[in-house]
Amino acid sequence: MDKNILIRIEHLTKHFPITRGIIFTRQIGSIKAVDDVSFTIRKGETLGLVGESGCGKTTLGRTILQLYRPTSGKVLYNGVDLTELDNAGMRRYRRQMQIVFQDPFASLNPRMSVGNILAAPLEVHHIDNREARSNMVQELLSLVGLSPYFTNRYPHEFSGGQRQRIGIARAISLKPEFIVLDEPISALDVSIQAQIVNLLDELQDTLGLTYLFIAHDLSMVRHISDRTAVMYLGKVVELASGDDLYSNPLHPYTKALISAVPVPNPKKERKRERIILEGDIPSPSSPPKGCHFHTRCPYAISRCKKDEPIWRQVDADHWVSCFLYE
């Protein structure tokens, strides 16, 4: 096993049942939020995850952390399969894996002071005594760029950017190794987004963190990520290093995504060719047979409608799921 691999995901699947009836419920289908996904996350890297709304990015992040138990597949963390652990077994790994939620307004308890919010994980895991925890809370606030004297304030007294800093402080309070960043900047003003991204960069260098960075903004993902995975309708369709993905996209969906990113050069922007996808994204409760993207793909062939492409490595660190590259 490669010692540089922190997390290995093998054929990970998460389906949510669709039920009917109030007293006698029965399952009539399922939402295929994550469908047979495989990739690795290396120690110390930032892996970006992009795709349309509803494609399963957040579900994938939460399933990796076992906040959602998978339908099938494996999540190997330093060689240990987390899917085989019960809640008691997972408890010792919770300290190593944390999450920063998308909405800083909803992810903090409005009835708890900031000091109590940050001390709660330390108390749950029985770390030090009350006085030591109080000192640690002040250190955490300083680490994320907030005054250590804010411990007695409540979430409603802070701006959106400050609340997200508090959320980040809570995530690093247990000194984790891996953090899922679930669109941590999408609810913030553009002027604040860069500050939060710079803070995440600094914390990664200081604490040796590994990130899964989920986002919509491809330009921001390119800035912060070492590698980028592209997700469509529950499947990861392409994964490559940031530069390679943007300079040499292979999957038709990736090409369409990148063509939509504005170019900060008027002359190049006028010459740039946009790829407009026809139709709407299919429902995850009834995805198309064969390749999930064939209903919108301008390069689809008859085989795409019948067979599912294999997730294959086409270059040193470039993976894609498409028949065009067999």
Image: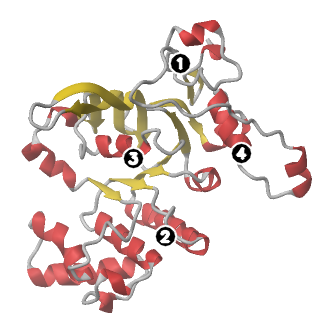
Q: Earlier in the sequence, mark 2 or mark 4?
A: 2
Q: Return the residue at label 1.
A: 291
**Dot 4: few (<14), some (14–19), or many (≥20) neighbours within 10 Å?**
some
Q: Is residue 246 above or below residue 317?
A: below
Q: Please state the horizontal and vertical placement of residue 237, each as a whole percent of the image.
A: 53, 29
Q: Is residue 92 above or below residue 108?
A: above
Q: Contact, CB < 8 Å: mark 3 with mark 4?
A: no
Q: Is residue 122 above or below residue 69?
A: below
Q: Return the residue at label 2.
A: 199
Instruction: Measure how far apart labels 4 and 1 are at the Cα level.
Output: 22 Å
Q: Return the residue at label 4.
A: 260
Residue 58: mark in rendering:
3
Q: Is residue 244 visible?
A: no
Q: Amino acid at mark 2?
A: Leu
Q: Earlier in the sequence, mark 4 or mark 1?
A: 4
Instruction: Measure how far apart labels 3 and 2 are at the Cα level.
Output: 22 Å
Q: Earlier in the sequence, mark 3 or mark 4?
A: 3
Residue 146's quadrant in the figure? bottom left
Q: Earlier in the sequence, mark 1 or mark 3?
A: 3
Q: Residue at x 10, y 39 (%)?
A: 86
Instruction: Measure how far apart labels 1 and 3 are at the Cα level.
Output: 22 Å
Instruction: Measure how far apart labels 2 and 4 are at the Cα level.
Output: 28 Å
Query: Of circles 3 and 2, which is in front?
Result: 3
Q: Amino acid at mark 1?
A: Cys
Q: Secondary structure at mark 4?
A: loop
Q: Residue at x 55, y 68 (%)?
A: 193
Q: Residue at x 13, y 50 (%)?
A: 91
Q: Amino acid at mark 3?
A: Thr
